[in-house]
Amino acid sequence: MQARSAIFKDNAASALADQRLQQALKQVRPRFTGGRARAREALPEFETLRNTARDIRNHTLTNLDFYLERYAAQVGASGGHVHWAPTAEDACRTILDICRRVGARRVVKGKSMVSEEIALNDFLQQDGLSVVETDLGEYVLQLADEAPSHIVAPAFHLNRDDWENRFREAHQHLPADRAFESRQDIMREARTVLRRRFLEADVGITGANFLIAETGSSVIVTNEGNGDLSQTLPRVHIVLTGIEKVVPTLEDTMTLLRLLGRSATGQDLTAYTSFSTGARRPGDLDGPEEYHVVLLDNGRSAMIGTEFQDMLRCIRCAACMNHCPVFGAVGGHAYGWVYPGPMGSVLTPGLIGIEQAALLPNASTFCGACESVCPVKIPLPGLMRHWREREFERHLTPSASRRGLAIWAFLARHPALYRLTTGLAARLLSLAGRRSGRFRRLPLASGWTGGRDMPAPEGTSFFTQWAAYQRKTRKRAVS
């Protein structure tokens, strides 16, 4: 997927003007934030679990090489194969080589954000393979040739009639009078088409929510069961995921699972939580003949030992974006790459470079909602500040902003001059805006007044009020 993060401002403006998208975005708060709040209240130990989960992820990342080696050894012991992929190209090439070796022509995929990250579908299709997404939302987006807009509900930006139109355009067998009056109608139609794809597939590809070093197992969570069918019916199962997904033990995994569903959708657990350990063994009734795990680095190891290591704790629940006022206003496509919202604003610059994603860390109100709901307590606002520092150091910020900050820094280093200047400016603005109480246009403030009015200052400055408060406090202490 080609990154379009560099034009975030243009993307956001288009999103704000898209009335159909704005209608769909209204579903975010009641559907996701309300569900998480109810799930949190129903679990008294929720905050304790968050602390435990944070510590598990920190411990794992500190010892990542050890747990990856242990996981690979356990996969090998269960008859599977681990493939190390330093780059996106390496991962795509490895998967294509497996498909070629087994003579595969048809591939089914469970939901995988990493496959979006490396543009796997395009790569395989260029070699003549048929690749079908089996997650309902991903399938509809594939029909429309669109990218996901959310890491949990990839097609939530579409309204019900959008779904129906996609089916009518792609499914030629549909009679004209076929009605789609409910979600069940949509699922029934998708099931009719996809069940045949599962049975015909040579290779199934899934992501992984967690990799268990203790057992060599991969874990996926879904609400549709498509992940189970993708990994059990085809002859070959390929797991594609990032190196940071490894977890030490089964017990640690259960701790994280207790937080994942509640944080993502408000569920205690998703409808399906599936563990896969190696290929089919003698006596097994089903399962693949071959089991492969492709572990992608693609910039992740470069974050280890830096101020951005905390981002690798992420378990992809999407709670941060569900509670983000910026994401709630513009949706996921505005961020221009695979990972949207606050987690994308930190992760994307780390994976594709701050040069291509400098606007994303600035797409935040710094309200702190993302950090307050993160199940593994990632300090997302602080990490975005670090990226802003990198942006400034590399002279990627606009020259006008740099000049403004330089002037402010000079004044801040001279407190008396700062108070004099800001006090004078406040008085002048107060007088100029006395009649209307606001400014529709203001020199040097077009970035603000282009979208809203600027309130005229009222009363005295904070410095003046604080000095008066201190004098009053001292006077009381003396008396």
Image (spheres, rainbow, N blue to C red):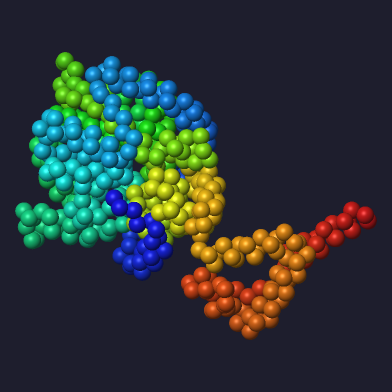
Extreme front residue here?
Answer: 394
Count of labels shown? 0
Residue lying furthest right: 479
Query: Is residue 111 positioned above or below 25 on the image?
Result: above
User: Which residue extends farthest bottom?
Assistant: 435
Indicate the position of residue 446 as horizontal and vertical percent values. Answer: 52, 73
Say whether residue 74 is left or right of residue 321. left
Task: State whether residue 4 appears in this view.
Answer: yes
Q: Is residue 272 visible?
A: no
Residue at (6%, 53%) from the top-left corner? 173
- Seen at 28% across and 28% down, the residue is 83
The C terminus lies in quadrant: bottom right
Q: Is residue 249 left or right of residue 431?
A: left
Where residue 93 sits: x, y (%)?
23, 37
460 up-or-down from 476: above or below: below
Q: Is residue 429 above or below residue 119?
A: below
Indicate the position of residue 329 as horizontal and vertical percent values: 42, 61
